[in-house]
Amino acid sequence: MLENNLITISAEREFSVTEISYKIKELLENNLGYIRVKGEISGLKIASSGHGYFSLKESTAILACTCWRPILSKIKFIPVDGMEVVARGKLSGYAGNSRYQLSVEILEQAGEGACLQILNERKDRLEKEGIFNKEKKFLPFLPNKIGVVTSITGAVIQDIIHRISDRCPSHILIWPVKVQGENSADEIANAIDGFNSLDQNIKPDVIIIARGGGSVEDLWSFNEEIVVRSVFNSNIPIISAVGHEVDNTLIDLVSDKRAPTPTAAAEFAVPVIANLNYTISSYYDALYSKITQLLRYQEQAVSANTNISKSLNNRIDYNQQLLDELSFRLLDSLPNLLKFKTAGLESFNVEILNPTKMINYCELELIHQTNYMIKSVNNTLKNYEYQINSNSSLLSSLDYNTVLKRGFAIIKSKDGEFITSKAIANKKQEFNIKFFDGDIVVNCNDSNQ
C-alpha cells in the first residue's frame, strides 16, 4: 500500500526535497501507527535539553529512536548501551538526514528486566489485596500422606522421595505437572486445587510444590497469579521449594513454609524417624520412672492413711464410751436434781415477791443514796472553799503593793522601761517613781546624774 501511494504521488507532479520528506513522514505515521520494537540500545546520547537519542540494533539492522524529555523522565530504569529493551512508539521520518526513526513513548526492559518489572507490579497489586498477609498454617509434625506437585521427570522428585524415605517413610502422592512453558501455570494450579478436592481419606496432610533452579523466565509459572491464588486458597499446608536458595517466587510469600531447596522441603515435611524413636524412648523411660515414683508415694500414702484410720477409729470408740458413761450418770442424777429443786421451791418465801415490800425497800435505798450524795457534795464544797482561802492568802503575800508599803518603790523611764541599774538611769532624763500610795515624776539634768 505504501509503495503504491509513492508511485501514484511521483507520477502526478514534481516535488521538492522538503515536500517529499514530509510526504514520506506523513505516509509512515498514518499507515504504521503505534508499533512495538525489540532491540539493543546503541549510541545513547542525552542532550542538554533532556531529550534522548539512540538506536535499536540487531545483528543485521538498526533503527534510530528519539525519546523526548517528558517520556525519558518517566522511565523506571536507567537505559544504557547494550541493554535489550522493548520500545513502543510511532514511526516517523526525519528530513534532516533522510531517515526514518521511532518516536519512543514507552520504553521497557526486555527479557529478565521486563519480567522483573511485571513481577514487581504484580507483587505490589497482590500485596495491596492482602494475599501475602494471610495467617500461616502449621505443618503437621508427622504427616501420613504427602502430596508433591512437580515434574515426574528430572532429579527433583527423586531427591524428595529418597529424602523422605531416609528420614521417615511416608505415603507420597505425586501430581505430575509441567514446571515451565505453556499451560504449566494452569497445570500447577489445577494440581493444588485437585489435592484440596480429594476425599478426606486420601487427601494429603501437606503439599510440596517443587522444581529445580533456573532463570526468572524458567520459574515464571510460579509467579503467575492463578498459581498464587490457588496456594492462598489451599486448606492444606503448602511448602514451596522452587529453585535454589537465591531464587524467589511469589508463591514463596503466600505458602505456609518456604524451603531453599526441594531436599530441604522433604526435611521440613517429615522428622527423622531415628531421632523420633530416641525421643519416644527417652519419654517412655522418664514416664516409667515418674509412674514408679508415684506408685511408691501412693503406697506410702495408703499405708499412712490406714494408720490414721485406725487411730481415728480408736478415738471414736473412746469418745463413744465416754458419751455412754456420761449419759448413764445423767440419768442417775436427774431424780436427785428434781428432788433438790422441788425442796427449794417448797421452802421459797412467796412474800419476798410482794410489790409493796419491794417498793418500800427501793424507797429506803433511794433515801440512803440521797443522804450519801448530799454528804459527799458538802465535803467537796468545803475542800474547794479551803483551797480558795489558801490561794487568796498566797496571792496577798505576793502582791507587789505589799512590798511597796514596806518602803520599796518602782522606777520607770518615760517610755515605760524599768530602771534596774545606775548605768540605765544615767541615760534617762525623766523618771516615774511609783510608791504604794501614788506616782511622782522626777526630771534630772546632766549635773545631777
Image (cartoon, rainbow, N blue to C red):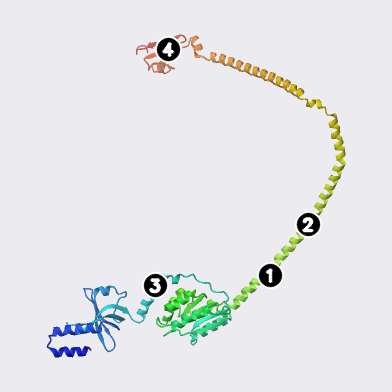
Of label 2 and label 4, which has the lower sequence position?
2
Q: Secondary structure at mark 1?
A: helix
| Residue 125 - label | 3
In which image quadrant can residue 392 be found? top right
Residue 248 visible in image: no
Q: Residues within 10 Å of mark 2 (few under 14, many from 20)?
A: few
Of label 3 and label 1, which has the lower sequence position?
3
Q: Residue at x 78, y 27 (%)?
A: 353
- Give the distance between the C-alpha atoms of the residues marked 2 and 4, in whole angstroms: 107 Å
Q: Which residue is mark 4?
A: 433
Task: Classify 331 as above or below 158.
Answer: above
Q: Residues within 10 Å of mark 1 (few under 14, many from 20)?
A: few
Q: Secondary structure at mark 4?
A: strand
- Give the distance between the C-alpha atoms of the residues marked 2 and 1, in whole angstroms: 31 Å
Q: Residue at x 20, y 90 (%)?
A: 4
Q: Residue at x 44, y 9 (%)?
A: 438
Disc 2 vs disc 4: which is toward the camera?
A: 2
Left or right of 44, for residue 153: right
CB atoms of marks 2 and 3 within 8 Å = no
Q: Secondary structure at mark 2?
A: helix
Disc 2 vs disc 3: which is toward the camera?
A: 3
Amino acid type at image mark 1: Tyr
Q: Which residue is mark 2?
A: 309
Disc 4 vs disc 1: which is toward the camera?
A: 1
- Give the distance between the C-alpha atoms of the residues marked 2 and 3, in whole angstroms: 78 Å
Q: Which residue is mark 1?
A: 288
- Give the distance between the C-alpha atoms of the residues marked 4 and 1, in whole angstroms: 117 Å
Q: Position of residue 324 (x, y in %)?
A: 84, 47
Residue placed most toward the observer, 296 or 308 = 308
Residue placed most toward the observer, 275 or 35 = 35
Amino acid type at image mark 2: Ser
